[in-house]
Amino acid sequence: MLNLIKSICEANDFDVIEFECGLEIYTSFVAIPKEGNKNQEYFLLVTSDVLNDELIEHLLINDAETMLESLQNSSFADESLTKNCTMILCSPVGSVSDHSLLKFEENPYHFKKNVISYSPTELISLNEVLSGDFCNAHLNLLMGTDSGQTFEKFKSGTIEEGSYFPLLIRVITKLPFVHYIPQSNQLDNIERFVNDALDAQDIHLLDLICSRELTQESMDSLINGEWLNHE
């Protein structure tokens, strides 16, 4: 899972370097925004082969502070890194209780913290549909797959077990630099909705309003005039 997050960071204008946090029990990387990247937030990517509730508690009490100190002493550290860094913890489903994960995310000290939980089947499925393309645009394309039918199944809880989609949602919601891109056909859908919902007189009036640069006063006059003409 950590390799997937690394690839998403690299495809979205981050340099990702291995980070020796001083604690052998963890594997960690730092995602650093490239020059020109408007997103100046840094990300500490962390996982462990022995994640459990006890380790999460230890991470909160001791290890997060040790990691922050190691970051501050690193060759690539600057003031913005140590003050604007989010820890992303990759956690296999079932290894840590929901209570411990929620406590971890709500802890305000040392780092902002987000958890991405995953199952092996979800991870395999998501890697398959990504097919090596980890950019924001492709993630958005997968969000709207099947004209939104997969999303509707996800919302209703009827999506098939092992689908990539729940993990895709978690990735998009937990990585702030992955943002929603409105689909180009949405404006067409809005126009179709308007034309279906309005009668001929209202559509004519809407066309008049949209075709002119109007003040509030002139718009009122136009609307009143059109209304009287059709009484």
Image (spheres, rainbow, N blue to C red):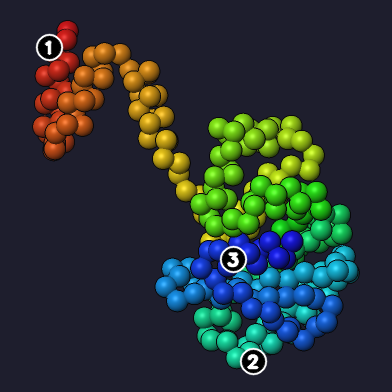
User: Which percent across, then down, holds residue 56?
Assistant: 82, 69
Find the distance from the CA under tag 3 to the CA under tag 2: 23 Å
Q: Secondary structure at mark 2?
A: loop
Is 25 left, or right, of 36 in this rendering? Answer: right
The kind of residue on which mark 2 rests is: Asn
Specify the quadrant that holds the C terminus.
top left
Residue 180 in sight here: yes
Q: Is residue 231 left or right of residue 104?
A: left
Name the spot of residue 49 as percent of width and height, x first.
86, 69
Camera-nearest label, 1 or 2: 2
For residue 93, what is the image quadrant? bottom right
Circle 3 crowding by C-alpha within 10 Å: few under 14, some 14–19, many from 20: many
Dot 1 amino acid type: Asn
- Give me the disc on residue 73: 2
Name the residue nearer the viewer: 188 or 53: 188
Separation (CA) of disc 1 from disc 2: 77 Å
- Tell me which amino acid carries mark 3: Cys
Q: Earlier in the sequence, mark 1 or mark 3?
A: 3
Q: Nearer the viewer, residue 144 or 53?
A: 144
Q: Earlier in the sequence, mark 1 or mark 2?
A: 2
User: Foreground: 99 or 136?
Assistant: 136
Q: Which residue is mark 3?
A: 9
Q: Position of residue 19 (x, y in %)?
A: 69, 81
Image quadrant holding the N terminus, namely: bottom right
Q: Is residue 187 above or below residue 123?
A: above
- The tag on residue 229 is 1
